[in-house]
Image (tube, grey):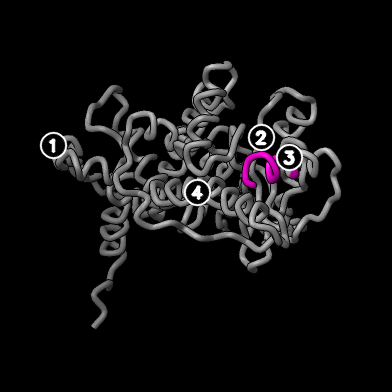
């Protein structure tokens, strides 16, 4: 039977279709009332003390950064559209990344340098160390385009190769988060401002510890490939145990901010900003003594690197002096 037997019926249906459906606004739960102190810290990596009228705005960005949730799920949780979540993530991340200068910086004063050297020395008696350097890969979606494959790393997935230097407290003291996954760790280092500063002698009497992916320098100590004497083995053992700080740093950082482990699904430009933003938050958390058992699991996403075998006279001399005078 045809119920639309007259033009008047069609007109009525057309009129009904044009009536705008009233929008329903569901009340959002207040996270400060909804969660206990522990639950709040687990979700937002923050103490439960609001300091901003835009706390909802900030938390929407944090929930993505901390938990690695899909933007559409974050939007569903807060009753907002995915595109709004995307804009919030960008704005919150940029604001956090802008805090980089005071929170991510190499030690500058003699007192700070001495304190850092002492903490590293207390690990395994390795002197004059002010930082451990390494690269870690943050998984991303394929950016596509002509240069998309340059982001594919040696393990076969797309990533950003992030270089970081940490201290013995696992603070990130320097970060370079702008290189595609196919770029070698040594190339990232050679192109960095920190490398130029060390080469220019801006950190006299200070050492960095790097793995065999880095070239031996008078300021960059790397392990011996074939230790033979007890002193050389002692040097390597001390190097490994001290440099382990950077592996632990990456593990804690990625545990604290799951988006770094699960992978970022944002555009590359936004991804780079998010990485720096999480590094800022990581250091703030350490300064606030917020460990929260993040070292329970260490994330191992190391991509195999070619061994650098560069015969550097100054580096060899410094390493040999350490072996003979400290580790013999």
Q: Quadrant of the N terminus?
A: bottom left
Q: Nearer the viewer, mark 1 or mark 2?
A: 2
First in sequence: mark 1 vs mark 2:
1
Question: Is 108 located above or below residue 303 in the figure?
Answer: above
Kind of element beneath mark 4: helix
CA distance for labels 1 and 2: 49 Å
First in sequence: mark 4 vs mark 2:
2
Q: Which residue is mark 3?
A: 321
CA distance for labels 4 and 2: 20 Å
Q: Is residue 148 magenta?
A: no
Kind of element beneath mark 3: helix
Instruction: Please report contact status of discs 1 and 4: CB closer than 8 Å, yes or no.
Output: no
* The residue stretch that appears in magenta: 320-328
Residue 53: give x, y in percent of width and height: 28, 23
Kind of element beneath mark 2: strand
For disc 3, the neighbor class at 10 Å (few under 14, some 14 to 19, many from 20) is: few
Asked whether, in this view, residue 111 is left or right of residue 152, the answer is left
Q: Which residue is mark 1?
A: 33
Asked whether, in this view, residue 236 is left or right of residue 15, the answer is right
- The residue positioned 54% from the left and 60% from the top of the image is 301
Residue 172: give x, y in percent of width and height: 52, 36
First in sequence: mark 1 vs mark 3:
1
Of residues 218 and 95, the one drawn nearer to the viewer in this rendering = 218
Kind of element beneath mark 1: helix
Q: Which residue is mark 4?
A: 250
Residue 277 shows up from this direction? no
- The residue positioned 57% from the left and 26% from the top of the image is 105
CA distance for labels 2 and 3: 13 Å
Of residues 263 and 194, the one drawn nearer to the viewer in this rendering = 194
For disc 2, the neighbor class at 10 Å (few under 14, some 14 to 19, many from 20) is: many
């Amino acid at each position: 039977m045809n119920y639309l037997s007259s033009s008047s019926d069609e007109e009525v249906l057309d009129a009904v279709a044009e009536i705008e459906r009233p929008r329903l606004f569901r009340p959002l739960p207040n996270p400060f009332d909804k969660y206990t102190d522990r639950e709040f810290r687990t979700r937002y990596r923050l103490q439960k003390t609001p300091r901003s009228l835009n706390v909802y705005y900030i938390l929407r960005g944090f929930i993505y950064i901390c938990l690695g949730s899909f933007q559409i799920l974050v939007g569903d949780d807060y009753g907002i559209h995915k595109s709004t979540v995307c804009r919030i993530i960008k704005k919150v991340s940029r604001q956090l990344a802008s805090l980089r200068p005071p929170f991510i910086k190499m030690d500058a004063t003699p007192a700070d340098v001495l304190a850092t050297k002492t903490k590293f020395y207390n690990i395994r008696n390795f002197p004059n160390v002010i930082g451990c350097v390494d690269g870690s890969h943050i998984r991303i979606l394929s950016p596509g385009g002509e240069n998309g494959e340059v982001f594919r790393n040696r393990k076969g997935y797309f990533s950003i190769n992030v270089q970081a230097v940490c201290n013995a407290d696992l603070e990130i003291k320097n970060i370079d988060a702008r290189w595609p996954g196919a770029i070698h760790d040594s190339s990232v280092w050679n192109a960095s401002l920190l490398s130029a500063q060390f080469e220019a002698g801006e950190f006299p009497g200070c050492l960095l510890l790097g793995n065999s992916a880095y070239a031996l320098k008078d300021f960059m100590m790397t392990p011996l490939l074939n230790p033979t004497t007890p002193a050389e083995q002692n040097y390597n053992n001390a190097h490994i145990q001290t440099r382990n700080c950077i592996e632990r740093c990456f593990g804690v950082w990625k545990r604290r901010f799951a988006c770094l482990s699960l992978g970022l699904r944002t555009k590359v430009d936004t991804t780079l900003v998010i990485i720096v933003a999480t590094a800022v938050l990581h250091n703030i958390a350490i300064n606030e003594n917020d460990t929260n058992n993040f070292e329970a699991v260490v994330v191992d996403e190391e991509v195999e690197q070619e061994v650098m075998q560069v015969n550097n006279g100054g580096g060899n001399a410094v390493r040999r002096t350490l072996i003979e005078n400290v580790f013999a």
